[in-house]
Image: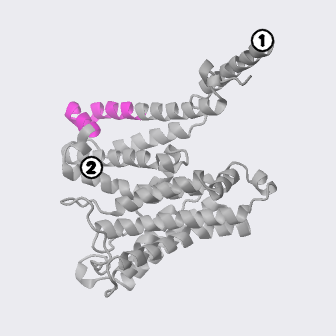
Amino acid sequence: MKIKFKQNNVLTSQEISKRFSILRTALALLLAMGIAILLIFLVSNNAGRDIRSLLLGPLTSTNRISQMINKWIPLLFTGTAVCLFFSVGQINLAAEGAFFAGAFTSTLVAIIGGIPPGLHFILCALAGGLAGAIVCGLPGIMYTKFNVLTVVSSLMINYVVLYLGLFIITNVVRDPAAGYEASYRFKNTARLAELIPGTNVHTGLIIGVLVVVFGYLLLYKSTFGLQIRTIGANAAFARYSGMPVAKVIVLSQLLGGFIAGLGGTTEVLGLYNRFGYTGLTNHGWDGIMLAVLARNNPKYIPLAALFLAYLRTSADVLNLTSNVPSEVINIIQAIIISFIAAERFLAGWEYRTIVKNTEKAMSLKEGVANE
């Protein structure tokens, strides 16, 4: 006789862990928002108004909604990219450099005239994606060939990319007529079109959604994704099972880098008419935070990214309408990540729940056996 544990309110340990993961995230969000509201009470001249701005500010006008969406789009790319890195067990921090590399490399193509519309953006995307793949692939190759710690090499390569990119922009394609350190204007054939008329929300949103879907299908619906997750969980077991560990690690870093570089391309060609970055944009670091929030599952990246974009837009509203410093938002982010990343947070409760369900399952089995 087959026992259906769910009908007897008995959950498996995996189901319990999943529920506690959701609970841990929800409690982290509630605690962070509670502390934010307390800080606003302490520093604000009009706490009621500023709390409303924090909670509802991004929804108060079409312009603010479009700003929030545009903050959301690049996070879809970097969040998905970092999910690929972390799922294979590599702490690759080069998504930041890949995003920047994708932006300035696609700029070199976007300023070229005479390329037909459609094809022009595709060429820009390929250039940006390949640049990002190189940036993130190098730490993976260095790890598999020379056992160089990925976290160190990827962190250093971000600064190589930054200063190389700024050198190229400043000395090769700088427009003297711009009035500041910026490239020549992008050709209109390279730029992304508006998705919603009357706003600056661009078609990069569609590309970002497709990237998230691709990332989820790759990680959870393909053999390659199974290899990535198996290596991330236990590389020694994967190697013993005959999986090409080094190959999968390098390919996952290349693919994640391509996605991050494509994000940089989408960002600059969707929002700007020339390259004007003077430093790293922090989109890659945000991607790390999103991967932690999403537990390395691209399926949850859109929700996590939307939450972060909402917070950032709330910070902008507070800066405009109150004396509350934007650092309040940074405090919220830090608290959320700290609680979610803390493996011991609610661990005792989770352990007791697993033990109780295990005992209940054993008693049910014994009862069936006695029958």
Q: Which residue is mark 2?
A: 316
Residue mark closest to the camera, 1 vs 2: 1
Q: Observer-nearest residue: 344 or 362? A: 362
Q: Observer-nearest residue: 214 or 45? A: 214
In the drawing, does residue 245 fall left or right of residue 332?
A: right
Quadrant of the image occupied by residue 247: bottom right
Amino acid bearing label 2: Asp
Q: Is residue 292 visible?
A: yes
Amino acid bearing label 1: Glu
In the drawing, does residue 199 fall left or right of residue 305?
A: left
Across and down, in percent, residue 39 comes to: 33, 34
Q: Which numbered circle lies on residue 155?
A: none
Q: Which residues are magenta?
A: 32-55
Quadrant of the image containing the N terminus: top right
Across and down, in percent, residue 277 comes to: 35, 69
Farthest residue, direction front:
1
Residue depicted at 57% across the width and 37% down the height = 342
Mark earlier in primary sequence (1, 2): 2
Please tell me whether residue 54 belongs to the stretch shown in magenta: yes
In the drawing, does residue 253 fall left or right of residue 308?
A: right
Residue depicted at 34% across the width and 55% down the height = 71
